[in-house]
Image (cartoon, rainbow, N blue to C red):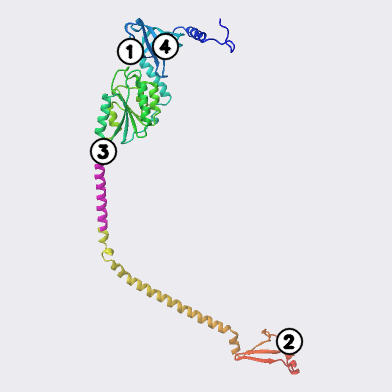
Amino acid sequence: MTTPSSPEAPWPVRTVARKIADWIGRLGEVWVEGQVAQLSRRGGAATVFLTLRDPAADLSIPVTCARDVADRPGLELTEGARVIVRARPDYYVARGSFSLRATEIRAVGLGELLARIERIRRLLAAEGLFDAARKRPLPFAPAVVGLVTGRESAAERDVLVTARRRWPAVRFEVHHCAVQGVNAAASVMDGLRRLDADPDVEVIVIARGGGSVEDLLPFSDEGLVRAIAACRTPVVTAVGHETDTTLVDHVADVRAATPTDAAHRIVPEIGEQRRLVEGLRARARSLLGSRLEQQDRWLTSVRSRPVLADPARLLHGRVDDVLALRQRGRRTVVHRVEGAERDLEHARARVAALSPAATLQRGYAVVQRSDGSLVRDPAVVADDERLQVRVAGGRLPVRVDRHPADEEDQT
């Protein structure tokens, strides 16, 4: 037993390395699944070197095995193949490296691959990555189209030739990548990220020709599916033949049956659009001509009416009406004035009849004191008081002079 380490008694590197090797050695044999990468058979060497890769996590572990394990009959060990390995973890103390020492290698069959794809499909569907609500419409006539495809492939030729024949103005930003093998998914994701970051690219097409399930396996990679779901640019997939379906077809905004079908979907056909425009122009011309003819007929009908054929006729017909109204107005005013005059005469007569002046005309007089008040009682008047007597002909100043005879008369 090694004494515990401390600042005063640290372990040497070799001790730490041996302990790590012991800990790893206690793990025993394990079954590991992954994808073969960097397979190396060095001449007649008895050991075969390969790397076992996890595509979903982008991790890899070096593996060594005996040649008879790698060349077992019925096992086709190639780069990109899915395998299940029985191995013992090993830590090489001299180099400080970790590896697996394989004692058995089994190929993953087609059924297992399809079952794995189905499990990934259910997982991504449960996350909502395939929902129809996430699908975005494609632009009508994109100026720039991004294309992710293999170099000088038939799929590239089908997309470019068909699209340019349909819409000559379209431009392509092409990213060539591996579309088969262990690095295919990562290569497609790299092109996808580059084109999605280009502000001029309005739609991205991922195109590949047909192949076996193993050939199309990179297009069911979970990382690639998530990369497409994260794109801001609409994505069209055209992978394989019409009967081939990969996971990228479920997450894409539009799934095309073939690369040629993808070209039909991303750009309109110029001849069809010209015919459509000509049809719309002819329809507009017909509608406009019909409307003009209708308005011309209406204008002709209006001009033929008597009031517009001879506008003065309407005025002539109104002259008699104006004269009749003037005469009626004049009669009404005269009648009302005469009635007002009669009413005024009656009022004047009544006023004259009730006026004090009329009473004075009959010989009566009005006696007023100097302050203008009327004298109604002789007792209120003092001797020698000056008064005014108003008669019909004017005013007379008088002075009060009471005599005894007058007093006797009063009594």
> Secondary structure under badge 2?
helix
Q: Earlier in the sequence, mark 3 or mark 1?
A: 1
Q: Which residue is mark 4?
A: 32
Question: Which of the numbered marks, if any, corresponds to residue 273?
Answer: 3
Task: Please report the residue visible at 39 percent of the width from the left and 74 percent of the height from the top.
Answer: 328
Circle 4 or circle 3, nearest the eye: 4
Of tags 3 and 1, the one toward the viewer is 1
Residue 366 higher or lower than 101, as above or below: below
Which quarter of the picture shows residue 360? bottom right
The residue at which mark 1 appears reads as: 78
The x, y position of residue 55, in whole percent, is 39, 18
Tag nearer the camera, 2 or 1: 1
The answer to whether 393 appears left or right of 398 in the picture is left
Q: Decide which of 42, 103 is in the foreground and name it.
A: 42
| For the residues bearing labels 2 and 1, Cβ distance under 8 angstroms | no
Q: How many marks?
A: 4
- The residue under label 2 is 379
Q: Disc 4 residue type? A: Val
- The span picked out in magenta is 270-299
Query: Magenta-highlighted stretch: main secondary structure?
Result: helix
